[in-house]
Image (tube, rainbow, N blue to C red):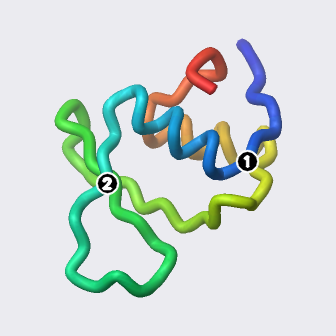
Amino acid sequence: MDKFPSTSAKKALRALQRIGWCEKPRLSKSGSHKQLENPNYPYEFTWAFHDGEELGPKMLARIAKQTGLKPKDI
């Protein structure tokens, strides 16, 4: 099994967008939480990280479990 590298939250979010996750429009522009949706998944994924945060391999593995993200996508 490939391991995830540490990466910034901004890069991880871009990788999720490349594999089909899109940000849902929000009524309120305040707050740092983003709701992501993908037509291939029956649920939404909540993204609560700031762009400059560093995400470690364990956190990326947890995100991957819910979203289908793979190390090669980053």
Does label 2 or label 1 sit earlier along the sequence?
A: 1
Q: Which amino acid type is marked by label 1?
A: Ser
Task: State the image coordinates of residue 33 (x, y, percent, origin top left).
Answer: 46, 72
Q: Quadrant of residue 42?
A: top left
Counting other residues with Cα less than 10 Å from the Cα at mark 2, is it few (<14), some (14-19), or many (20 or more)?
Answer: some
Q: Disc number at residue 23?
A: 2
* Secondary element at tag 1: strand
Residue at 52% across, 33% down:
15
| Residue closest to the eye, 73 or 67 | 73
Counting other residues with Cα less than 10 Å from the Cα at mark 1, is it few (<14), some (14-19), or many (20 or more)?
Answer: some
Gap in angstroms between the C-alphas marked 2 and 1: 18 Å
Residue at 24% across, 59% down:
24
* Secondary element at tag 2: strand
Horizontal placement of 59 versus 15: left or right? right
Task: State the image coordinates of residue 5 (x, y, percent, origin top left).
Answer: 80, 30
Horizontal placement of 70 versus 18: left or right? right
Q: Image quadrant for the C terminus? A: top right
Q: Quadrant of residue 72?
A: top right
Horizontal placement of 54 versus 30: left or right? right
Instruction: Look at mark 1 in the image and give the residue it sits on.
Output: 8
Relative to 8, residue 6 above or below: above
Horizontal placement of 53 versus 25: left or right? right
Relative to 24, residue 6 above or below: above
